[in-house]
Image (tube, helix red, strand yellow):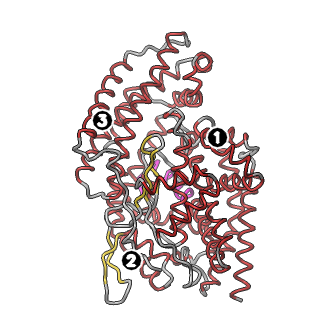
Amino acid sequence: MATSTAALPHWDLTTIYPSFDSPEYTAAFASLEEGLKAAEQDMANVTTPGGAGATVVADVDAWIGRLTELTTLALKLSAYIELSLSVNSRDDVAQAENSKVQILFSDLSKIETRFTAWVGSLDVENLIDQSAIAQDHAFLLRKAKIEAQHLMAQPEEDLAAELTLSGGSAWGRLHDDLTSQIEVLFEREPGNPEMLPMSEIRNLAMNQDRDVRRRAFEAEIAAWKLWETAIASALNGVKGEHTTLALRRNWPEVLDQSLHQNHIDRETLDAMMSAARQAYPDIRRYLHAKAKALGVGKLAWYDLFAPLTSNDREWPWDEGVAFVLEQFGSFSDRMRDLAQRAVDERWIDAEPRSGKVGGAFCYCVESDISRVLCNYTPAYDGVSTLAHELGHAYHNLAIAGRPRLQAESTPMTLAETASTFCETILRKAAIAKGTPAESLAILEGELQDVTQTVIDISSRFLFEQAVFEQRKTRQLSAGELSDLMLQAQKETYGDGLDESALHPYMWAVKGHYYSPDFAYYNYPYMFGLLFGFGLYAEYEKDPDTFRQNYDELLVSTGEADAATLAARFGFDIRSEAFWNASFDVIRQDIDTFVNLIDEQFS
């Protein structure tokens, strides 16, 4: 498949700030520094009475407003820096500014921790009854009341906020910088060696030629092997920080803190993961059928994203964008207009290149303004990824009118709602409009995504559990990390893949493992996929009513825990039956796929 990216767009960041040396950026940075310094001094003088009288109510209201202003400015500055680095990790100026702004985020974290401790001393329910502002932030205040029980003493919290700059945050930045700059010598055509960025090497997993896929996979593995020691140090550093702080803050396990951050409980997670395990054999049936279509006895890792035939439709950028606009418009004018705005205002950076991070993401810059990064390939998967990230941008638009602190509190579990829904809209239309061969390819693409979001996410979850358990007592070598990853892949993929051709370095590939702020950056994706399937089923039942309620759901994602929000739509996410119902939809698609493969390749 062609991988030409000559016409792919780069985003425009000058509408955020013209440059790092512009008066606008300099003034914003100085304003944040001054605001944080003043807030830190004033917060140190805040008293902590046991009740919520009129003075306390006014003080809390004022501090919510103050924190909103500081957070909004800090996030805008961080967005400009992070987005600059994500497309050019060799930008020394951006690296320097990132180091400086991380110190300010450390200061902001100290203020937020003091505010949380203060809220923990108050009668929160009485406070909510007395204040309209507190009512708007009710869920956040109740959540802070719980978090206050898991705080260290203030000097220790301050020290933790400062040490992460040379701890978890620094290790995470090392992973991003190092992996975005890895280049691999590779011959797509014999006698024509090229130095390709890792993102493009990994994109060759979608090449129609199995020999190209195999050689690219082997070259990728060799490159990870070369850098494994440094990357393993980064992973040990991040996971060590998570482990130490969770223990000091009296969380039973790092996972318990993660569940709190994601607004779900163990009962919900256990129900979902149990349903997933029951679905493994069905997903392996899909993998066996794909192996049959490709004419191999068993899929290797480098076959997971292979096209079924050499005649799969290509999706040049302009065609992919047009299709996204058309299908978003089939749902609502507002959704289409958002996607058109993203194109017109150059929110999207789509070209894979050296120094650019791999994967894809959407970043909320401020209010209703986002930026979308992807590494586009002219295949349906590339179009689907674009729709997914624009779904996040639509979610950002939907919550733009809500208080910023509430909007920022949307957990990962619910943050995947709009993205999954938008992908589903696109896929259903692509299957309906395509030729039989195209529809089969798109159905197979859906099952690729399902495999990644159920099987691979499960393997990542099991891997991370194992790492955290062992990291309690010591660091792990690169070889041990690879062994744990292979063990997790064998447990989840089972006989669906050739065990001699698994990917031992997925722990190095996925940047999700290296976040100092979020552990277990994996199971929320499964939640989002299955929850999104449930929502789409509701949409098909009654499109008009669903359209009226959809934005309300997105707006409310920071207002309550996931179970409470789901109950509004009649879903009991603590019940295995809910998750099994979503997997039943997937099973039907697998049955269809297997039957089609049997008909065409028997």
Amino acid on which the number 1 mark rests in the picture: Glu
Whether residue 524 appears in this view of the structure is no
- Badge 1 crowding class, 10 Å Cα cut-off, few under 14, some 14 to 19, many 20 or more, is few
- Badge 3 crowding class, 10 Å Cα cut-off, few under 14, some 14 to 19, many 20 or more, is some
User: 437 and 157: which one is in front?
Assistant: 437
Q: Nearer the viewer, mark 2 or mark 1?
A: 1
Q: Label for residue 581?
A: none
Q: Label for residue 28?
A: 3
Q: Are marks 3 and 1 in contact (CB under 8 Å)?
A: no
Magenta segment: does it hold 465?
A: yes
Q: Quadrant of the C terminus?
A: bottom right
Looking at the image, residue 543 sits to the left or right of residue 453; the answer is right
Q: CA distance from mark 2 to mark 3?
A: 45 Å
Secondary structure beneath disc 3? helix
Q: Nearer the viewer, mark 2 or mark 3?
A: 3
Q: CA distance from mark 2 to mark 1?
A: 48 Å
| Start-end of magenta stretch | 459-476
Magenta segment: does it hold 415?
A: no
Relative image position of residue 583 (x, y in whole percent): 72, 60
Q: Which residue corresponds to the image point at 41% horizontal and 35% vertical from the top-left? A: 72
Q: Are marks 2 and 1 in contact (CB under 8 Å)?
A: no
Looking at the image, residue 286 sits to the left or right of residue 23; the answer is right
Q: Label for residue 552?
A: 1
Question: Which label's residue is closer to the chain start, 3 or 1?
Answer: 3
Amino acid on which the number 3 mark rests in the picture: Ala
Secondary structure beneath disc 1? helix
What is the chief secondary structure element of the magenta stretch? helix
Question: What residue is pinned by disc 2?
Answer: 219
Secondary structure beneath disc 2? helix
Q: Which residue corresponds to the image point at 52% horizontal and 44% vertical from the top-left? A: 397
Question: Which label's residue is closer to the chain start, 2 or 3?
Answer: 3
